[in-house]
Amino acid sequence: MENIWNIKIKGEIMVNFLLFLLQAIPEMTGVIAFSVALAGVPLRWGIITPAATVLAVIAFVIRALPFTFGLHTVACLMLAVVFVAKATRVLLSKSFVAVFSSVATLAVLELVIHEGFFAVTKTDPQVYLANPLFWRLLGLPQALLMIVFALLAAKIKKPAEGMWKI
């Protein structure tokens, strides 16, 4: 009987992990892409997407640990700053400004999208918090918008060649 409970718990953790990644990977991809575009670095999706995936997994692990909620956000912000500074020729201070601007943009998008959705549907957010799949899907629009913003920023602010170290 104990073995059945272990399988159920492991299955629940796996489902939560996959649902988290469903939103976190595109969201982190958008944050890193928008950050490097703001810093004047060309978008290289073959570097950005794996880095975003690693940051998403780190965020999940931190959220699963008994730390204060929100610590994963601060940790990912700092790790993204270090990634942009080390993987590109962007100064650490400029990397911090770019990543912070990107995360601030994400926060505003999340607020506008969620508040707009709840205002239009006239529902209580608690109803959707109880449904993990729907809650993650509700986070996809801002993730996709961050990627669009990165593409637009790269078009408007012409990236300099030779900015990637890797």
Image (cartoon, rainbow, N blue to C red):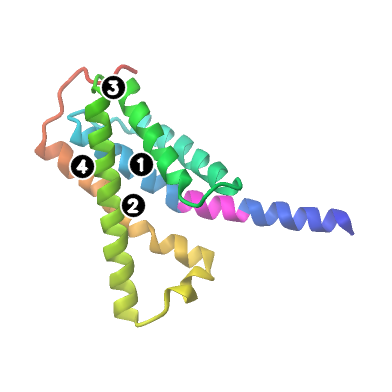
Quarter occupied by residue 74: top left
Query: Mark 3 falls on what kind of element?
Result: loop
Q: Which mark is residue 143?
A: 2
Identify the residue shown where x is 63% and y is 51%.
Answer: 14
Residue drawn at point x = 39 percent, y = 64 percent:
138
Cα separation between marks 3 and 4: 18 Å
Q: Residues within 10 Å of mark 4 (few under 14, many from 20)?
A: some
| Amino acid type assigned to the residue bearing label 2 in the image | Ala
Which badge, 2 or 1, is on the more N-terminal residue? 1
Quarter of the N terminus within the rendering: bottom right
- Which element is circle 4 on? helix
Q: Residue furthest bottom?
A: 122
Mark linked to residue 151? 4
Range covered by the magenta-colored residues: 15-22
The residue to which callout 1 is attached is 29
Crowding at mark 2 (Cα within 10 Å: few <14, some 14-19, many 20+): many
